Image (spheres, rainbow, N blue to C red):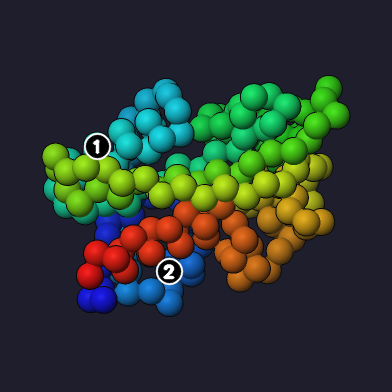
Amino acid sequence: MAPKELNFITGNKNKLAEVQAILSCTPVKLDSKAIDLLEIQGSIEEISRDKAIRAAETVNGPVLVEDTCLCFDALGELPGPYVKWFLQALGAKDFHKLLAGFEDKSAQAVCTFGYCEGPGKEVLIFQGRTAGKIVEARGPTSFGWDACFEYEGQTYAEMPKEQKNKISHRGKALAKLVEWLNQEV
């Protein structure tokens, strides 16, 4: 497959580094663009689809957008796509307190990529989910809620990056994207 160049729309350097690491063994070349896109309220898929359409129009070309969610089973999948605002308000150290009144601490880490070839083109959705649970922060708190999301005894923040990338919601979603790109040859 010839290299596929994509404009990855993110201003988050940690997210960019993680996506680049996951895609490093693929023919995908990322050009990162930090564009502040209006984010609608809606389902995970609706938000990703809308972001991809807006981004494709802005750069006038192929784009990859990403939306990461954390869905608490006890709260009917909330905070979901609004997790960023909850985390900003509480901070990683107090984030686990959202579930203080619940026995069920299970959660789903969800990553949804929206790919759009350009303005007016169809948006394709690639989603990955990893089941885990919410715990008191352990490990570095520099990357979102990684220190609060535990998978098989370790928080994402405690894991070596290579291990996290193999089992993470983002890694699973990108595997689906790469599989689709390989079929497009």
Q: Out of 125 and 81, give the one closest to the viewer.
A: 125
| Image spot of residue 132 (x, y percent) | 72, 47
| Image spot of residue 178 (x, y percent) | 38, 64
Query: Does the residue at mark 1 contact the one at mark 2 (Cβ under 8 Å)?
Result: no
- On residue 23, which mark appears? 2
| Image spot of residue 144 (x, y percent) | 60, 46
Residues packed near mark 2 inside 10 Å, few (<14), some (14 to 19) or many (20 plus): some
Establish if 106 lies above or below 151.
above
| x 52%, y 60%: residue | 171
Residue type of the residue flagged with mark 1: Arg
Relative placement, left or right, of 44 versus 78 is: left
| Image spot of residue 25 (x, y percent) | 43, 77
**Quarter of the image containing the N terminus?**
bottom left
| x 56%, y 32%: residue | 80
Mark-to-mark CA distance, 1 and 2: 24 Å
**Quarter of the image containing the C terminus?**
bottom left
Q: Decide if residue 73 is in sight here.
A: yes
Residue type of the residue flagged with mark 2: Leu
Could you say whether the residue bearing mark 2 is in a helix, strand or loop? helix
Q: Decide if residue 33 is in sight here.
A: no
Residues packed near mark 1 inside 10 Å, few (<14), some (14 to 19) or many (20 plus): some
| x 75%, y 50%: residue | 150
Establish if 43 lies above or below 122.
above
| x 31%, y 46%: residue | 124
Relative placement, left or right, of 46 versus 159 is: left
Could you say whether the residue bearing mark 1 is in a helix, strand or loop? helix
Q: Quadrant of residue 24?
A: bottom left
Identify the mark nearer the N-term, 1 or 2. Answer: 2
Q: How many marks?
A: 2
Give the residue at mark 1.
54
- On residue 154, which mark appears? none
